[in-house]
Image (spheres, rainbow, N blue to C red):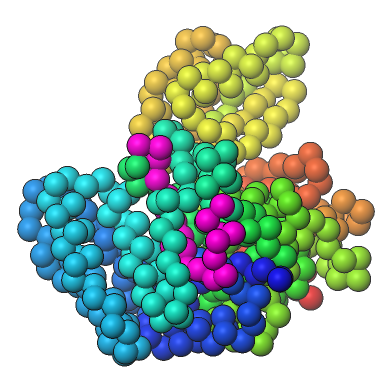
Amino acid sequence: MQTTVTKFGGTSLASAQQFKKVAEIIRSDNSRRFVVASAPGKRTSDDIKVTDMLISCSKVAAEGKDFTKELAMIRDRFVSIADELGISFDIDPELESIAAQLSAGASEDYVKSRGEYLNSKLLAEYLGFPFIDAADVIIFNENGTLNNEETYKKLPAVLKTCKNAVIPGFYGSKMDGSICTFSRGGSDVTGAIVAHAADAEIYENWTDVSGMLMADPRIVKDPAPIEFISYAELRELSYMGASVLHEEAVFPARTIGIPINIRNTNRPDDSGTMITKAVPPAAKKNPITGIAGSKGFCSVLIEQEMMNTEIGYAAHVLKIFADLGLSIEHMPSGIDTMSVVLKESDVLPVRDELLSRLEEELHPNTLTIESGISLIAVVGHGMSYKPGVAAKVFSSIANAGVNIRMLDQGSSELDIIIGVNDEDYEKAICAIYEEFRA
Ligand code: ADP
Ligand code: ASP
Ligand code: MG
């Protein structure tokens, strides 16, 4: 029997009306056996995601304050879905158990995982599918990374016994039984792990847009959809800020070559974006596949005459960053200069220590930190065989009156990274998009 693993995101499961669309999608194809569900997301743009409500509730409880009001609001979200669907699921014993855990000092990971837990129980009941608790099958290491060995031992064994099932996304448990979550948006990762464990033919990721778009729809108006994209391109775009799919979701699918299909729950007839190892040659019409980015970076610029002849200089610089636990995004360098680009929020707590260590241990001619930098990634396999693409990218930015503060090209020629001032970020993305739009 063919197996499709489906994952439905927060907006796809935010209300009874959305649950009905989800059920119709699942019932229309009986290969859609395993369903991974998120917590209820926003119903309207000013709504609050249940995960955010749970995080607030956990904070109130941690301060020793009364969390009854917060929990009641969460209860309302689930009860309104259950009532409208006519599901008999009794949520009150579940909420009593969550309240008892909150009073006993439950961890934030436990509390914020309850959105996926409760929503999946509701969905399982509505679909008439068994419920598998992710805590029993998704196993984390002590440091919060996935325990591949245990997960891929436990999960396939349980899936083998079920024709269908609903599994909550976002969380699992450590070997001691305590609940642990992925980072925000992590149900995408659970979906990919379930697809891997089920040896699925396809992993469908259902959301509120008709696939990956060439640029963030909150910046560019009606960006063109991407029909096909490679795992490598998707990884670059999602890492750089295309938040439609979690940046770690690609790995479990890629290792065994499961295609990922991003689809729209509100427009199920749209074919969405297909993510595979290689894009079919006929689909490569544009040298650029997509554009993504984010704000809030800074660049530490180190100038030292004859830096290139000093063996071990770069290694010494990197050791200082590593000692302070700083993870580096990019490192464009010249003969006598080195700049290290990293997240500003990471640097702030250790800024003084970083500068004094660089100063005292390396005595550079100049040492400066420039802040307020946005990074933009222009991604596409097509760039490597088309001369002049980079020139077009730069001239589009220049014509928009935007100053480029940093440039870096990945060694794979898969992307060009451009640094601009935070206030120019949106303008630069729109200019590049206009230049390359299909
Ligand atoms: P879900 O709740 O289904 O997991 P997310 O909110 O995590 O959905 O991801 C979908 C959202 O990602 C879209 O509504 C869109 O605003 C945003 N997004 C950002 N960049 C892109 C992009 N390049 N293509 C499509 N969507 C994008
Ligand atoms: N509900 C979680 C979040 O809001 C996980 C997810 O939706 O993937 O981040
Ligand atoms: Mg998401």
- Residue 128 shows up from this direction: yes
Location of residue 250 by image quarter: bottom right
Relative image position of residue 266 (x, y in whole percent):
54, 85
Task: Answer with left or right where residue 400 lies relative to residue 58.
Answer: right
Q: Which quadrant: the C terminus?
A: bottom right
Which residue does the image show at 63% across and 37% down from the upper left?
330
Q: In this view, does 206 lie above or below 312?
A: below
Q: Does the magenta stretch include residue 204?
A: no
Relative image position of residue 93 (x, y in whole percent):
19, 67
Location of residue 52 by image quarter: bottom left
Which residue does the image show at 73% across and 51% down from the upper left?
256
Task: Answer with left or right where residue 379 lies relative to residue 267.
Answer: right
- Tally of numbered discs: 0
Residue extent of the magenta highlight: 157-176
Relative image position of residue 356 (x, y in whole percent):
43, 17
Q: Which quadrant: the N terminus?
A: bottom right
- Residue 402 shows up from this direction: no
